[in-house]
Image (cartoon, rainbow, N blue to C red):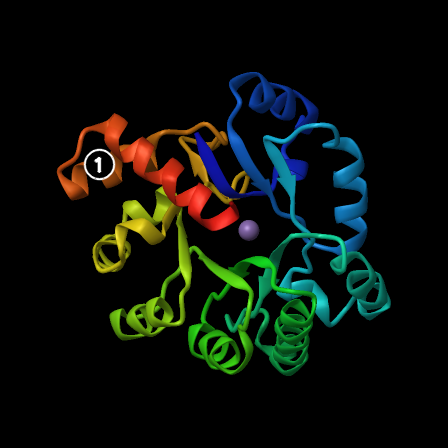
C-alpha cells in the first residue's frame, strides 16, 4: 500500500501506526507541518525505508513561525522530500497569503538550486497561485499536488508542467473530485490519506486504507491488483 501524504506524527498513537506500517511494508510519505516537527518526527521514525519523512512548513503556519525559516533552509539541503508546503487561500488563511506566496516561491527556487526535490503541495483555494510559481521555477523538482481541487483547465496546466497528483478517499466521494480524477493521466496518480484529518465513520483513515485503489480500479475498469501494480509503478517512477 502507498500513502503519499499522511500526517503520521499527528495520530493519537503514532508509534503504533508506524510499527504497523513497517510490518506491512507499506510506503508512507510522512509529511510534517514545521521544521521543528520534522526534526522530531525524523528522530522517531528513523531506521526504516518504508516511511520517508518530508520536511514541511504548512502554509497556515508560515507567517507566524518566521523564526523557524532558517532551520527550514538548513534542513532542506539534506532532505529529498518536502511537504507539506504550499499556499492556502481559504478565508481563514487568506490574511497571510502574501507571506505564503513569498515563502513558497523561495522554496521552489531553492529546491531547484539544491538539485530538485519531491514536493507534496497544498493548494486549497490557491491553485492559480501555485501553478504560476511552478511555471516559473519548478526546474529539477517533482511537484505532487496533494488533494487537488482545481478546475479541469488547471488540471491540464498542471499535467503539462509535469505535476503528479495524490488522491485521497474524500476526493473520490464528491462529484467534482471524481471528474477531476478522471481527467488526470493514470501514470501520474498516487494514493494518499491526509489522515488523521480525513475520517471514515469518525475514525481516521489508516495509511493502508484501500479505498482509493478500489475507486481507481473501478474508474478505469481494471482489476484491483492491476491498479495496485500500476500505482506501485508510478511510485517507483517518481522516487526512483
Ligand atoms: Mn495535509
Q: Is mark 1 within 8 Å of ligand 1?
A: no
- The image shows residue 198, relative to residue 126, as above or below, that is above
Circle 1 is placed at which residue position?
Answer: 217
The location of residue 191, given as percent across then percent down, is 40, 42
100 displayed left or right of 239? right
The residue lying at 51 percent from left, 27 percent from top is: 26
Residue in the foreground of this view, choosing between 116 and 33: 116
Quarter location, residue 109:
bottom right
Q: Residues within 10 Å of mark 1 (few under 14, many from 20)?
A: some
In which quadrant of the rendered image does the N terminus lie?
top left
The location of residue 5, given as percent across then percent down, is 52, 46
Asked whether residue 191 appears in the rendered view, the answer is no
Q: How many marks?
A: 1
The location of residue 93, given as percent across then percent down, is 59, 70
Asked whether residue 138 appears in the rendered view, the answer is yes
Outermost residue on the top side: it is: 23
- The image shows residue 141, relative to residue 172, as above or below, that is below
The location of residue 203, given as percent across then percent down, is 48, 29
Residue in the foreground of this view, choosing between 227 and 60: 227
- Circle 1 sits in a helix, a strand or a loop, which is it? helix
Residue in the foreground of this view, choosing between 18 and 116: 116
The residue lying at 52 percent from left, 73 percent from top is: 89
Outermost residue on the left side: it is: 221
234 displayed left or right of 226? right
- The image shows residue 164, relative to residue 31, as above or below, that is below
The residue lying at 37 percent from left, 69 percent from top is: 158
Quarter location, residue 40:
top right
Amino acid at each position: 500500500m502507498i500513502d503519499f501524504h499522511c500526517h503520521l506524527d499527528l495520530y493519537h498513537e503514532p508509534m503504533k501506526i508506524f510499527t504497523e506500517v513497517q510490518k506491512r511494508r507499506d510506503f508512507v510519505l510522512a509529511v510534517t507541518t514545521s521544521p521543528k516537527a520534522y526534526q522530531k518526527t525524523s528522530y522517531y521514525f528513523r531506521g526504516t525505508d518504508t516511511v520517508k519523512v518530508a520536511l514541511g512548513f504548512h502554509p497556515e503556519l508560515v507567517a507566524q513561525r518566521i523564526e523557524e525559516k532558517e532551520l527550514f533552509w538548513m534542513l532542506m539541503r539534506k532532505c529529498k522530500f518536502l511537504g507539506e508546503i504550499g499556499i492556502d487561500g481559504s478565508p481563514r488563511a487568506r490574511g497571510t497569503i502574501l507571506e505564503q506566496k513569498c515563502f513558497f516561491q523561495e522554496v521552489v527556487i531553492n529546491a531547484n538550486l539544491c538539485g530538485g526535490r519531491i514536493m507534496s503541495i497544498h493548494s486549497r483555494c490557491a491553485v492559480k497561485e501555485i501553478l504560476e510559481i511552478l511555471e516559473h521555477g519548478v526546474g529539477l523538482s517533482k511537484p505532487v499536488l496533494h488533494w487537488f481541487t482545481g478546475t479541469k483547465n488547471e488540471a491540464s496546466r498542471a499535467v503539462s508542467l509535469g505535476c503528479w497528483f495524490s488522491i485521497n478517499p474524500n476526493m473520490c466521494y464528491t462529484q467534482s473530485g471524481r471528474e477531476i480524477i478522471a481527467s488526470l493521466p493514470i501514470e501520474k496518480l498516487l494514493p494518499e490519506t491526509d489522515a488523521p484529518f480525513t475520517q471514515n465513520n469518525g475514525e481516521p483513515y489508516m495509511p493502508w486504507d484501500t479505498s482509493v485503489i478500489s475507486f481507481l480500479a473501478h474508474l478505469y475498469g481494471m482489476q484491483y491488483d492491476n491498479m495496485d501494480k500500476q500505482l506501485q509503478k508510478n511510485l517507483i517512477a517518481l522516487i526512483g
